[in-house]
Image (cartoon, rainbow, N blue to C red):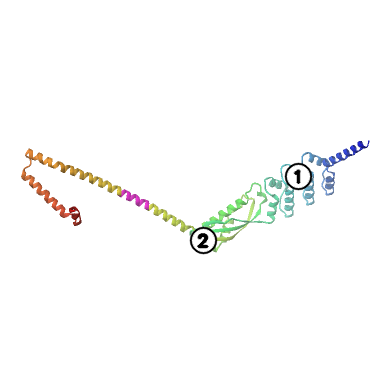
Amino acid sequence: MDSSIIFMVVGIVVALFILLYFLPVNLWFTAQLSGVRVNLLNLLLMRLRKVSPSLVVNSMIISTKAGLNITSNEIETHYLAGGNVNRVIKALISADKANIPLSFKSATAIDLAGRDVFDAVQISVNPRVINTPPVAAVAKDGIQLIAKARVTVRANINQLVGGAGEETILARVGEGIVTTIGSSETHKLVLENPDRISKTVLGKGLDSGTAFEILSIDIADIDIGENIGASLQTDQAEADLKVANARAEERRAMAVASEQEMRAKAQEARAKVIEAEAELPLAMAEAFRSGNLGIMDYYKIQNIQADTDMRDSISKPSDKRRSDKK
């Protein structure tokens, strides 16, 4: 009898714990005291839908105390969609206190897009300063300048969904710095008036299509880099020298080839002369036999040949004659 009573008591206690788990009476009572109207059946359905009732009720209590009108169905829907309910509630409260127009639908959309909606509201209230990496650019006089800038931005709530991030802002600011320095006649103009960069970059509307609004661009530092113009001129001179040497070598090779060709033709002509001279005695012998050439004619030809050789030797330089004698 005693054991049956014990089992009955244990069963009643277990059933009571199960009932209290599925029906969080304490949470419901706290909600009623905080002015949040929610029924026990709705809390039970949250359990069945695997939604934390404490998260929903606490979020509703915080938003109600802050003067926001958010229903439990909206909070539950955002939770089931994988959103961060606490971050959205904090963002809505901060935006309301700072008089920033932000609806629950917009806040949940920003949160589900992967952006930190609470951080975006904080940036809207307290603008953020973004330091750009060193940006190198070359002025028209060939001197390289390396500039660093501080970009003060404020979050644009309406552009957070689908708007570009900080990387785009930095890329556009870097492009503006390069354009401004590159259009300057000398690097001294940039060093004397660095605010030219800020004015030029701000005038381009670089924050269009981004999630931020650029408030100011301040040049933090400008350093002088290398003389790129002189380096390019040196490289160009070396390249021109190589081209000139290549063309000179080409002309020399063509001259050598032409000289060799002329020598070959001269040797060919000399060979033909020697061949003709070799046939001359045969022709003279044939002329003697046929009676077309007399002995006096032969001596006359020999005298003419000797006179020709003498004139030829006289016309040569003395050095040439010495070498021929040797």
Asked if residue 195 is positioned above or below residue 14 in the image, the reply reads below
Q: Looking at the figure, which quarter contains the N terminus? A: top right
Tell me the residue at 55%/58% (across/down): 146
Tell me the residue at 22%/44% (across/down): 268
Dot 2 or dot 1, earlier in sequence = 1
Indicate left or right for 210 with 26 as reference: left
Tell me the residue at 15%/41% (across/down): 279
**Residue 22, horizontal then vertical, whole percent:** 82, 40
Q: Nearer the viewer, residue 86 or 286?
A: 286
Name the residue at the bottom extreme: 192
Q: Nearer the viewer, residue 226 or 262?
A: 262
Indicate left or right for 95 with 16 as reference: left
Magenta span: 245-255
Element type at marker 2? helix
Q: Residues within 10 Å of mark 1 (few under 14, many from 20)?
A: many
Predominant SS of the magenta segment = helix
**Residue 142, horizontal then vertical, whole percent:** 48, 58
Tell me the residue at 46%/58% (across/down): 230
Indicate left or right for 90 with 277 as reference: right
Residue type pointed to by label 2: His
The residue indicated by pointer 2 is 187
Q: Nearer the viewer, residue 52 or 185?
A: 52
The residue indicated by pointer 1 is 75
148 magenta-colored: no
**Residue 208, horizontal then vertical, whole percent:** 61, 51
246 magenta-colored: yes
Name the residue at the front extreme: 326
